[in-house]
Amino acid sequence: MFQNFAFSNYETYPVDTSEVTEPEPKEPTPKYKSILSREIEILQDQIQKKAKRYKINGSVLVAYKDQILYEGDFGYKDPTKKTLMEPGLSYQLASVSKQFTAAAILKLHENKVIDIDHSVSNYLPNFKFEEVTIRDLLKHRSGLWNYMYLTEQYWDKDIAPNNLEVVNLINTHAPRLNFPSGRYFSYSNTGYVVLGAIVEQVSLLSLGEYIKEEFLLPLCLDQTFVEKTEKNKQTILKGYQPYRRSFIELPAGFHNNAIGDKGIYASAKDLHTWFRDLKNGEILSKENVDLMFGRDDDKKNKRYGMGFRLENKNNEPVIFHNGLWDGFRNGLVYYPKDDLVVIVMTHTQNKRKHYFQKQIVKDAKDLIKTSEIRLELEERESELIL
């Protein structure tokens, strides 16, 4: 008897003739700390000797292909009491903070809340210099006056102005731009304070709150802060200045109420985590990371991306930023070709930090070259044996 399956209670299933294929196994990630252990031992000895020679009070981190090869802490947490440095303490990043401000602006740009090629006055309605764009601020070519001079000359309150109050000072007391906006590069802390004000105006959060909500909490950066509180004051280092044969503790700078140009506190390890995820496109889109790293087609300024300085050494791009404020001298250097990151943090106004950092970079690059030669020779020897 014929059964009409079109209207029957019997369910029919198509026969799946496709083969089930297993996904190709991924190659295990090399453990560079183990593979390069010989070279790392030499690097460690070199860093420790140089830290002693240069009397470094601070922290160092060296990372290769997203893996930390070396991290160490040197000298004193409190040099006046000879309290030894501890791991995991947070430093005032000074101008290294600018990358967080740039990332906040580019996140808003990515989310189409703002357009970096629009005038600042579109987002700060009373901003008097309508020709200045957000891109000009990011690239240090706005021509704005130094807000610290304006504050010292015209601000008469005991508490320094915050970001939006700095904008009011500019509107009231800056008679003109130093040069036509967009024409020249001139490093400007003012531009990054104004960028902070834009974040605050459009997000209805303080810059610190926005950075915390958008970046710090999702990345679990619990050693990174935008303000000092009772909860974190034991974690954040104080700044010191050499005085005779000892040190004196430095009071917080008067201009600390405005942030964006400075104001982020972070440990070396947190800063590495942040930068690793940033460069790998996990915080911003690749297009916006390229803007930060100067990989766009902007021919006007190849010395600065957005939040990062740029150099070309021996035909190799270098992306970096240093910071100096309240006794802190810090630096982050990134060599994309080797995928090498070096972070140096200090808090006792040590002018030799520059040479210390430069030599660590050289030693780390030598480590990579030496290890590549050694590994190649070992591979050839094993092939000959087989």
Image: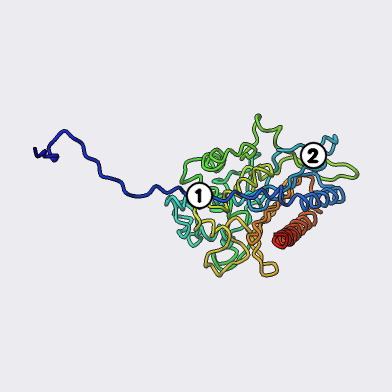
Number of other residues with Cα within 10 Å of mark 2, as a class: few under 14, some 14 to 19, many 20 or more = some
Q: Residue furthest top?
A: 230
Amino acid type at circle 1 is Ile
**Residue under numbered circle 1:** 198
- Comparing 30 with 64, the one in front is 30
Residue at 58% x, 59% y is: 293
Above or below for 182 versus 168: below
> Could you tell me how far apart the alpha carbons at marks 2 and 1 are, in whole angstroms?
34 Å
Amino acid type at circle 2 is Glu
- Comparing 384 with 255, the one in front is 384
- Comparing 97 with 53, the one in front is 53
Q: Residue furthest right?
A: 245
Residue at 66% x, 62% y is: 318
**Residue under numbered circle 2:** 249
Kind of element beneath mark 2: strand
Where is residue 26 drawn, in percent x and y? 54, 50
Where is residue 224 drawn, in percent x and y? 63, 40
The answer to whether residue 89 is seen in the rendering is yes
Where is residue 313 drawn, in percent x and y? 69, 67
Who comes first in sequence, dot 2 or dot 1?
1
The answer to whether residue 143 is seen in the rendering is no
**Image-quadrant location for residue 294:** bottom right
In the picture, the quarter occupied by the C terminus is bottom right
